[in-house]
C-alpha cells in the first residue's frame, strides 16, 4: 500500500524568506513522487517530479525537492518566497495518492 | 487551447437526480483519471483508464458511481441517485505513459457539483 503524509496543514512565511513544505511517504517499492500546486480558482499544476533519475529535483518557479529514501521524505523547498507562491501544495505518491495539502501563506 | 477540458464547469442538481460529467483529455494522452476533491482536502482518486480499458475502479465511492471511456478518447463520469454528500469538485486528468510509467498528469479545471 502507498500513502503520503503532509506534515503541516498550514505554513506561513514572510516574503523573501525560505519555504519548507514537508512530505513523508510510504511505499513498498521505489515510488514516483510529485509536488503539485493549486492557486485559488485555478487548476492543479505540476511543480516537479521524482522518478529515480536524481535525488535532488528542480522544478518550476525556483522550487526544488530532495528525495531521501532513508527518511522516506520528499520535502519541497524554495530559497526565497514570493507573494505569488501563496497557494495550496500537494505531495503525491505514485501519481494517484494525494496528500491532504499544505496551505502556504506569504506575508509582505 | 489543447489542455484537458471538462463539461459542465458547474452543476446544481436535486437529491436523487442522475448527473453525468464529461472530460476531454489532451489528444495524444493514453491515460485518463477521475478524482473527487472536497473543501480543504486533497484530490481523492476514483478511477482511471488506459486507452478504453478501465484499470482501477475499486476506489469508486459506491455503485452509484460509474465511468466510461468508450473509444479511448473522452470519458464520462456518472453519479446516479445523487446525495448531498456527493457535493464536491470532480477533477479529470490525463497523462502519456511512456518510458516513465508513472508520468505527470495534466488536470482539467474541474466540475463543481452541488446537490440540494
Image (cartoon, coloured by chain):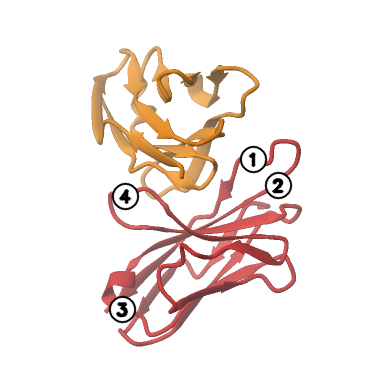
Instruction: Give the mark count.
Output: 4
Q: Secondary structure at mark 2?
A: loop
| Residue B91 visible here | yes
Depicted B103 relative to depicted B40: above or below: above
Depicted A88 relative to depicted A41: above or below: above
Shade of chain B as shown in the rendered figure: red
Q: From the viewer's side, name the closer residue of B64 and A46.
A: B64
Q: Is residue B3 left or right of residue B27?
A: left
Q: For residue B103, which numbered disc appears in the image?
A: 1
Shade of chain A as shown in the rendered figure: orange
Q: Are marks 2 and 1 on the same chain?
A: yes
Q: What chain does mark 4 sit on? A: B
Q: Secondary structure at mark 3?
A: loop
Spatial distance from mark 3 to mark 1, Cα to Cα?
34 Å
Q: What chain does mark 3 sit on? A: B
Lower sequence index among marks 3 and 1: 3
Residue marked by disc 4: B41
Lower sequence index among marks 2 and 1: 2
Residue marked by disc 3: B83
Depicted A56 relative to depicted B94: above or below: above
Q: Are marks 2 and 1 in contact (CB under 8 Å)?
A: yes
Q: Secondary structure at mark 4?
A: loop
Q: Are marks 4 and 2 in contact (CB under 8 Å)?
A: no
Residue marked by disc 2: B96
Q: Residue at x 69, y 65 (%)?
A: B53
Estimate the x, y position of residue A70 in percent, counting from the top left. 44, 18
Q: Give the quarter of the image for residue A29.
A: top right
Q: Residues within 10 Å of mark 4 (few under 14, many from 20)?
A: some
Q: For residue A57, which numbered disc appears in the image?
A: none
Estimate the x, y position of residue A82 in percent, counting from the top left. 37, 21
Q: Residue at x 61, y 40 (%)?
A: B104
Q: Is residue B44 left or right of residue A29?
A: left
Amino acid at each position: 500500500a502507498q500513502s503520503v503524509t503532509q506534515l503541516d496543514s498550514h505554513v506561513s512565511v514572510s516574503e523573501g524568506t525560505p519555504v519548507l513544505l514537508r512530505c513523508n511517504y510510504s511505499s513498498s517499492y521505489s515510488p514516483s513522487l510529485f509536488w503539485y500546486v493549486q492557486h485559488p480558482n485555478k487548476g492543479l499544476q505540476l511543480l516537479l517530479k521524482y522518478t529515480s533519475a536524481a535525488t535532488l529535483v528542480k522544478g518550476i518557479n525556483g522550487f526544488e525537492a530532495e528525495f531521501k529514501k532513508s527518511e522516506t521524505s520528499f520535502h519541497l523547498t524554495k530559497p526565497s518566497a514570493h507573494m505569488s507562491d501563496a497557494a495550496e501544495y500537494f505531495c503525491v505518491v505514485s501519481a494517484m495518492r494525494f496528500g491532504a495539502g499544505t496551505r502556504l501563506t506569504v506575508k509582505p | 487551447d489543447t489542455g484537458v477540458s471538462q463539461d459542465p464547469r458547474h452543476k446544481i442538481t436535486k437529491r436523487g437526480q442522475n448527473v453525468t460529467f464529461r472530460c476531454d483529455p489532451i489528444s495524444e494522452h493514453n491515460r485518463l483519471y477521475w478524482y473527487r476533491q472536497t473543501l480543504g482536502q486533497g484530490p481523492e482518486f476514483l478511477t482511471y483508464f488506459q486507452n478504453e480499458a478501465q484499470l482501477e475502479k475499486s476506489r469508486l465511492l459506491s455503485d452509484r458511481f460509474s465511468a466510461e471511456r468508450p473509444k479511448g478518447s473522452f470519458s464520462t463520469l456518472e453519479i446516479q441517485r445523487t446525495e448531498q454528500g456527493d457535493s464536491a469538485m470532480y477533477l479529470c486528468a490525463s497523462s502519456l505513459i511512456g518510458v516513465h510509467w508513472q508520468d505527470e498528469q495534466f488536470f482539467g479545471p474541474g466540475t463543481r457539483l452541488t446537490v440540494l
